[in-house]
Image (cartoon, rainbow, N blue to C red):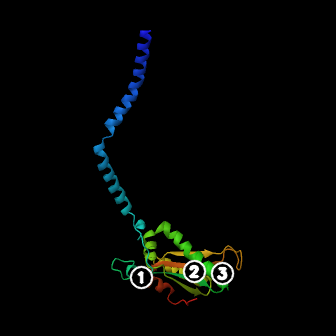
Amino acid sequence: MWASYKNSTQSQLSNKKPHKQEKEWFAVGFKPENLIPGLVIGFIVGMLLDLSKPAKNLPKKKSFLVGRTQQQCSVSDNGDQELKMVLVVRQDLKMGSGKVASQCAHAATGMYAELMQSDRFLLRKWEQCGQPKIVLTCKNQNEMNKLKDAAESIGLPTFVVADAGRTQISAGSKTVLAIGPGAKESVDSVTGKQRLL
């Protein structure tokens, strides 16, 4: 009987040894004196990675004061160029005012979505300016195409809305051209002769 108790005790001890070895490995691998420096280094590396992305540096509190936002509205480092977007609406389609408003909204949000993928820095600068938008007119598709080509030739972003054809006009009709956001002078050099809607 004593031999069986001794054997069972030894087998229990031998089963506990690997568990104790696991604890010893953890104790060797984890040292409390390494915890604080590890956290500090991880925090610093995280901050450096976050600061390297200009799109994430957004002001926490938005201000819509004209004077204050005008100071932040610049493309270049010397702060001499304001940003704006122009929406050019075709007049030959004879769209109703609600349809024009809807198509302009499609143009602005379409441009915004494209810039989220391609140029977040420009988008954030434009947001800081209060997202100025001007609505102009053009006579027809031919004039719209010329404006689009002129804008793209000087590096301005463009977006054209093609209507789905559910209401007033036929499917695929090009209704509104968005130009910019871009430097006010550059946008005006393309659209300066167009009439306001």
| Residue in view at x 57 percent, y 83 percent | 88
Q: Residue furthest left?
A: 33
Question: Where does residue 56 sit, x and y in percent of width and height?
Answer: 42, 65
* Amino acid residing under circle 2: Asn
Q: Of the residues under marks 3 and 1, which one precedes in the sequence?
A: 1
Q: Of the residues under marks 2 and 3, which one precedes in the sequence?
A: 3
* Amino acid residing under circle 1: Glu
Compute the Cα span from label 2 to label 3.
Answer: 21 Å
| Residue in view at x 52 percent, y 76 percent | 158
Compute the Cα span from label 2 to label 1.
Answer: 25 Å
In the picture, the disc for residue 150 is none
* Element class at badge 3: helix
Q: Residues within 10 Å of mark 2 (few under 14, many from 20)?
A: some
Q: Of the residues under marks 2 and 1, which one precedes in the sequence?
A: 1
Q: Quadrant of residue 141?
A: bottom right
Apparent side of residue 104 relative to residue 164 in the rendered image (left or right): left
> Where is mark 1, residue-wise?
82
* Element class at badge 2: helix
Q: Which of the two marks, 2 or 1, is nearer to us in this view?
A: 1
Q: Quadrant of residue 97?
A: bottom right
